[in-house]
Amino acid sequence: MGVLFDWDSPEQAFTDLSYRDEEALPNKGIYTMDRFNIFIFCCLIMIGSIVIASDDEDEPEITVDLSGAGFDAEEVQVLQDDEGNTILGDFDGNATVNFDDFFIFADNFSQKDFVEATDLDGSGAVNFDDFFIFADNFGIAYAKAEAQPQDPTQRANAPVFKKLHKGINIDTSLPSAGVWPKVQHDVAQFQAAANAGFTSVRVFMPFGAGTEETERQIVDALANDLAIVICMWGNSAWAKNNIAVGAEQIAKKWGELARAWKKYPGDLVFEILNEPKGIGYKEEERYEEVMQLYNSAAQAIRNEDPTRPILIGAPRSNDPEYLDPYVTEKYLTYAFDGGKGFYDDTNAGVAIHFYNPRHEDGVNFAMWIAPLPEDKKWKPIVLNKITTAVSWRDRIGVDIPIVTTEWGCWTFPGRPDAELTEWLQHHMSNFRKHDIGSMWYTGMQNNQRSFAIFDSELGWNQTVLDQLTGFTPTALPKTSQIINSEFHQPGLSWRLTSDKITQEYVYGSEAFSGNSMLKIHVPQNAEGQLYQQTYGGNGEYIGAPGKTLLHLIKGQTYKISFISASEGGKGRMRIMLKNAHNIDLIYDSYEADNGWIHIGKEAKTHTRLYTHNKESEMDVRLELDVGSKEQVLYLDKVELIRN
């Protein structure tokens, strides 16, 4: 298919195409041009050829085949005019924005799969907004502009940083360390991440946690060809003591880990400290202390392993606004390998976090249920976070990898897919444009978690996954739905129906699994149940609408298990599953077994199977009924998992 326009020259044609106001067209007598006509023009040239009429006697018509206009996407040039202004659109790298570039642009216009460089405004689509940016930069005025020379400060960074461009947080607990809202780590979670197209995972390691269980996560990740970021949660005592104490402790810990884990390849990354504000460093006058923590740890790591990839964050909540002036050689003075420092460290990157737009931005889309506002109200806010980090990198003049190790928003059934997609595309296109890594927070924590995009019984949120990886998973792993199954600490996860029954968290080697368990004392003349169901709290735990904790899917068989013992060896208990809203009974082990589950003196795992043949129940209550018998029970490692 061809289309004929009667212009005297290609330059005249594009001059007309670049005008937004048809009344101002210098060649208005030839045709009438408005946005609709531009759209028709672009659609036509995408699928055929264009014939341009000229007054050149030797070549009165120029026919250009638009099929397969090609160029090396990795060699796209960025031009600058004499005043240093960026001139976008030189796709073929010939130092001018001309018709060769236009035909490349046309091939990508309105396409679902497009070359990233043609998305000039980073919106996640090649559309008329990009067309007018391109039009503004088109013409021979820039023909003499020279392509921007390669930055001599660019360096050969560790390849693992590219794997962090497609990452996911897996925010789970370990048997010996964790907090109440989380499910337990399971290798199946990493298998699910790999199956969903992610190339890296990020996990948390509390400062006081044992290293053996974290090392298990390293092995599990590498076995699934995933890079893994181990991020340390610091000790809140550091902010209460002299900074020298905290600096010594964090250095000692990271030095030990660097020595012990030197055997692992470069796909293991150390993120030195997560969000210092969370452990007490809230005021800016203390941010220099934060950098002492980072610097001490980095020095300890480099003393043991000069090539271990590390991530250093900014103060506060790893906000990009504080990269400058804190994440610089002024505060990062560590040295290694004969005098190399932070700017020479090709195995060092920086970590930033942001969730926007949020309440301080005037509309809380990221961390609440507000709808997405107009583009002009939220896109500049998100872009500012990214360009702030890029400006820091440009100012120091070193090509240091930047990884957004946390970003995300609430996801819930009522959030429109169109809004979510638009918001995601804006982030992802700008991450790609500015070469910034992306690790969504969070993939897994629990089924109810507002930020989570994975449900143990339903799988991934495909709308989000379409933008993060573009994969459609082929398998759904079997993982437990129970939170705080090892009874790490009190919270909203486990509750008692009677205040006459008391519970106590027991820590240490006496625990049946990990280093903690629950002790339940049932006195005379008391009866009740220990239960878990969708929780409701304040702040971040208030919960997104439509998200629930425990599910039973029609046709699935579930294994309910726990480890238990009793004082005196004559304890008893039964398992019940109920509808969390009306407390209708779904399953009762007493009825299924014709009696109680007997709890002996020695710890033993008790297991029951239940097949849910009724309609799916999306909000379920798990009860462990201790009856009315006077007894003292010990409980650990509770699981509800598809069998």
Image (cartoon, grey):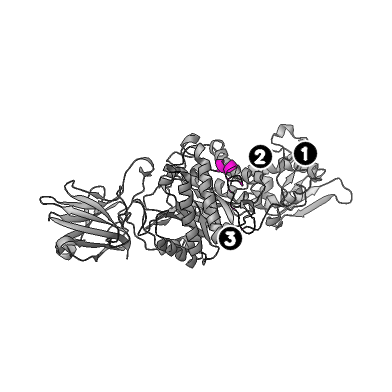
Q: Position of residue 467 (x, y in %)?
A: 53, 52
Tell me the residue that label 3 is attached to. Answer: 306
Q: Main secondary structure of the magenta part?
A: loop
* Placement of the N terminus among the 4 image quadrants: bottom right
Question: Is 320 colored magenta in this rendering?
Answer: yes
Q: Which labelled disc corresponds to residue 35? A: 2
Question: Residue 58 vs residue 331: left or right?
Answer: right
Q: Quadrant of residue 483?
A: bottom left
- Residue 642 is situated, as x and y percent measured from the top left of the image, at 33, 63
Asked if 433 appears above or below 559 in the picture, the reply is above
Q: What residue type is labelled 3?
A: Pro
Residue at left offset 61%, top offset 57%: 336
Q: Is residue 489 left or right of residue 628?
A: right
Start and end of the magenta stretch?
A: 318-337
User: In the image shown, does 102 or 178 lie closer to the viewer?
Assistant: 178
Q: Is residue 227 visible?
A: no
Crowdedness near tag 1: few (<14), some (14–19) or many (≥20) residues, C-alpha within 10 Å: few
Residue kind at label 2, given as amino acid type: Arg
Q: Is residue 358 above or below residue 217?
A: above
State the SS at label 2.
helix
Crowding at label 2, few (<14), some or many (≥20) Cα neighbours within 10 Å?
some
Q: Which residue lies furthest to the top in this view?
A: 23
Which of the marked residues, 3 or 2, is nearer the chain's N terminus?
2
In reply to whether residue 461 is colored magenta, the answer given is no
Q: Earlier in the sequence, mark 2 or mark 1?
A: 1
Q: In which quarter of the image is residue 585?
A: bottom left
Pinpoint residue 126: horizontal percent, then vertical percent: 63, 48
* Dots 3, 2 in contact, CB < 8 A: no
Is label 3 in a helix, a strand or a loop? loop
- Residue tagged 1: 30
- Residue type at mark 1 is Ile
